[in-house]
Amino acid sequence: MSTPFKYNVSVIEQWVDYNGHMNDAAYAEVFSRAVDALMGHLGITEEVIQEKQYTIFTLETHLCYLNEVHQGESLTVEWQLLDHDVKRLHAFFSMKNTMVTWSQQVNKCSWAWIKVKESLRHFYHLFKKR
């Protein structure tokens, strides 16, 4: 059920660390931005969230750093749906450096979400503080 989707971005100066390559936290930011774009691609827009009164929260992410990327290099993020049910989604994301001829994979990430009813999202925090 994976809908074709690609998120493209170039590595900006703010993402580059003192070693001259993209900082580890920036990989997570790129994946997070890709997830936001994917939600829109799938029709899970702010308007739909407001209308249906449901949203999606991240349960877990797992990143694997495979190769370095540098400022100005172009990245493409693709996704594959691994599993889903009425409340949860589990997906795999692949980040590739498209500046090299073989489209080198630089990072991969698994991501799990849960569907949450908007009216109950703050209710949970009341019990968490006790």
Image: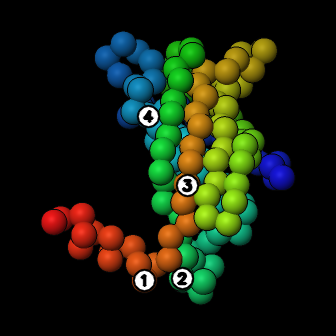
Q: Is residue 114 above or below residue 7?
A: below
Specify which label sits upstream in the sequence, 3 or 4.
4
Q: CA distance from mark 2 to mark 3?
A: 16 Å
Looking at the image, do the residues carrying marks 2 and 1 touch, with CB atoms under 8 Å apart?
yes
The residue lying at 50 percent from left, 70 percent from top is 116
The residue lying at 44 percent from left, 34 percent from top is 26
**Residue type highlighted by circle 4:** Ala
**Residue type highlighted by circle 1:** Ser
Q: Label 4's element?
A: helix
Q: CA distance from mark 4 to mark 2?
A: 31 Å
* Disc 2: which residue: 53
- The numbered mark at residue 119 is 1
Query: Label 1 neighbourhood size at 10 Å, few (<14), some (14-19), many (20+)?
Result: few
Q: Is residue 112 left or right of residue 94?
A: left
Q: Label 2's element?
A: loop
Query: Label 3 neighbourhood size at 10 Å, few (<14), some (14-19), many (20+)?
Result: some
Q: CA distance from mark 3 to mark 4?
A: 20 Å
Looking at the image, do the residues carrying marks 2 and 3 touch, with CB atoms under 8 Å apart?
no
Specify which label sits upstream in the sequence, 1 or 3.
3
In this view, the residue in front, 87 or 92, is 87
* Disc 4: which residue: 26
The residue lying at 53 percent from left, 15 percent from top is 68
- Total residue callouts: 4
Query: Label 4 neighbourhood size at 10 Å, few (<14), some (14-19), many (20+)?
Result: some
Specify which label sits upstream in the sequence, 1 or 4.
4
Specify which label sits upstream in the sequence, 2 or 1.
2
Q: How is the image coloured?
A: rainbow
Query: Label 2 neighbourhood size at 10 Å, few (<14), some (14-19), many (20+)?
Result: few
**Residue type highlighted by circle 2:** Gln
Question: Where residue 108 sits: x, y (%)?
Answer: 61, 28
* Disc 3: which residue: 113
